[in-house]
Amino acid sequence: MIGRIAILSDIHFPYQCPRAWPLTLSILPRLNLDAILLNGDIIDFEPISKFVECPRKKIELKPHLDESYKQLLRLRKAVPKARILFRPGNHEERMEKHIVTKAPSLIDLAQLNGPLHVASLLKVDQLDIGWIANDRPYRPYALGKLDVMHGHEIKAGGKNAAEKIYRSIIGNMYVGHHHRFDRYIQRVLRGPMNPVWVGGCVCNVNPDWTFFPQWQQGFGVAEVS
């Protein structure tokens, strides 16, 4: 049974916030956590993105992977006894999509346990981090009665993301992806309250490729009994 679990998403290594990420690492050991769920977009994978965010610079993948491993190692050292789980988001999926479109003959190497799979590239086994594979169709990860997804699986862009997600699922859910906090709670006649939470991010909220996005930093903590 998992008791208290922190849910972190959208760190976007190597574009983590230089203030929010160290602060997160200092807070996590104080929370008496049983587990940490890395809920997608932990690594940005900008070098293989189809979106050209900053055309003036050349970016390579290996330094991004090295920095991501270094920061995951910092996380493991901060909470040496906590169970850590990693569920990929849309940015982690960039690797498989890149191979499918650019080098489809290598797709077998990008499957789970293959050398080109994200879990292998980040060496999560060395860090004792469990990998939760995204299956098709997407299914949420259950923390008791709370379902958890990264957030890209449900079309809910723009304002009022939490309400849009509720209208899609009619249930309890926690997601990241949107980089800003939101909450919607619906009462059900002769039934339970159904809340949907949208968590914040831990990445840089002032990236150089856009102007002043309305992003908010933070993470969630859930208790399962």
Image (spheres, grey):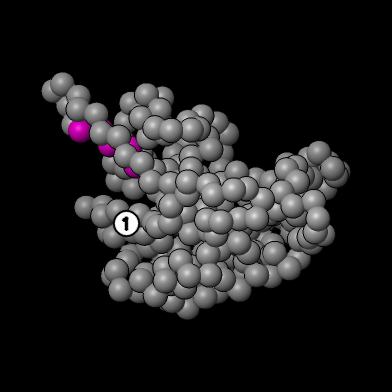
Where 141 falls versus 62 (above or below)? Answer: above
Nearer to us in this view, 151 or 116 = 151
SS at mark 1 in the image: strand
Q: Is residue 94 left or right of residue 215?
A: right
Which residue appears at 43% of the width and 46% of the height? 180
Which residue appears at 37% of the width and 62% of the height? 35
Nearer to us in this view, 47 or 107 = 47
Residue type at the position of mark 1: Val
Q: Position of residue 94 (x, y in %)?
A: 69, 46
Residue found at the very far left of the displayed protein: 190
Q: Position of residue 60 (x, y in %)?
A: 79, 61
Nearer to us in this view, 39 or 80 = 39
Q: Is residue 173 visible?
A: yes
Q: Position of residue 44 (x, y in %)?
A: 63, 55
Q: Is residue 126 visible?
A: no
Nearer to us in this view, 1 or 157 = 157
Where 115 falls versus 161 (above or below)? Answer: below
Q: Which quadrant holds the N terminus?
A: bottom left
Which residue appears at 60% of the width and 61% of the height? 15
Which range is magenta? 193-197
Instruction: Look at mark 1 in the image and give the residue it sits on.
Output: 221
Which residue appears at 59% of the width and 65% of the height? 124
Q: Is residue 149 left or right of residue 49?
A: left
Residue 196: in magenta span: yes
Q: Is residue 214 left or right of residue 65?
A: left
Residue 49: in magenta span: no
